[in-house]
Image: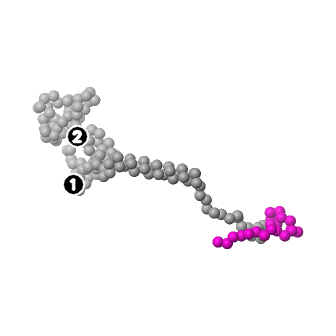
């Protein structure tokens, strides 16, 4: 069922509404702006998220019934794409929280660079008098006492 020519008379509008299983009151054709929509109905830009999930749909995955006209940009409004349902948090609050978090993290990175903090460490401890002979020490001399700290 391809779109027909743009309806110009009330009779053509009624025929187009019947063709798309709509009443004459709810039928409104797409604007005749030369893009070739013809008599295809202009449907609201609403995603499938806004449709009732508990209704017994003929095609529950797409939340559609048989014979229902499809939006011209149907592939944009399926459930894994654009969600046009109202958000519980308004955009102003979302932006404030996002930029506040980013600003806080930037401040923390700045302070981390400005005032670095390291774990306290002691010199590496080796056995056998700090490997005195293995490191080329003189066997005739007594090595210096190595102070090891106990925790």
Residue hosting label 2: 43
Q: Residues within 10 Å of mark 2 (few under 14, many from 20)?
A: some
Residue 80, horizontal then vertical, whole percent: 34, 48
Query: Does any portion of residue 7 appear in the rendered image?
Result: yes
Q: Quarter of the image containing the N terminus? A: top left
Residue 46: percent from left, percent from top: 26, 44
Magenta part mainly helix, strand or loop?
Answer: loop
Q: Residue 88: percent from the left, percent from the top?
A: 30, 52
Residue lying at 13% horizontally and 29% vertically, measured from the top left = 9
Of 87 and 101, nearer the camera is 101
- Image-quadrant location for residue 132: bottom right
The reply to whether residue 62 is visible in this rendering is no
Q: Judging from the image, what secondary structure is the residue with disc 2 in?
A: loop
The answer for how far apart the CA atoms under marks 2 and 1 are is 20 Å
Q: Earlier in the sequence, mark 2 or mark 1?
A: 2
Residue at disc 1, secondary structure: loop
Does residue 89 belong to the magenta stretch? no
For mark 1, what is the residue? 55
User: What is the span of residues highlighted in magenta in the rendered image?
Assistant: 132-151
Q: Residue at x 16, y 35 (%)?
A: 16
Instruction: Choose top left, top right, bottom left or bottom right for residue 31.
Output: top left
Residue at (68, 65) in percent of width and height: 122
Q: Residue furthest left?
A: 11
- Residue 10 marker: none
Closest to the observer, 140 or 8 = 140
Vertical side of 118 occupied by 15: above or below: above
Q: What residue appears at the point 69 percent right and 70 percent down from the top-left corner?
A: 149
Position of the C terminus by quadrant: bottom right
Image coordinates of residue 103 in percent, x first then y, are 46, 49
Number of callouts in the render?
2
Q: Classify residue 148 as left or right of residue 45.
A: right
Pointer 1 local density, CA inside 10 Å: few below 14, some 14–19, many at least 20: few
């Amino acid at each position: 069922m391809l779109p027909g020519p743009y309806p110009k008379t009330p009779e053509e509008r009624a025929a187009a509404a019947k063709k798309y299983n709509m009443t004459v009151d709810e039928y409104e054709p797409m604007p005749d702006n030369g893009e070739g929509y013809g008599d295809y109905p202009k449907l609201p830009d609403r995603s499938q998220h806004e449709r009732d999930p508990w209704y017994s749909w003929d095609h529950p995955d797409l939340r559609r019934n048989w014979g229902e006209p499809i939006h011209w940009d149907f592939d944009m409004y399926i459930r894994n794409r654009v969600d046009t349902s109202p958000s519980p948090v308004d955009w102003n609050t979302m932006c404030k929280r996002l930029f506040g978090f980013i600003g806080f993290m930037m401040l923390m990175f700045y302070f981390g660079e400005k005032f670095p903090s390291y774990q306290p460490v002691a010199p590496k401890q080796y056995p056998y008098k700090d490997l005195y002979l293995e490191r080329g020490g003189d066997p005739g001399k007594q090595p210096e006492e190595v102070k090891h700290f106990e925790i």
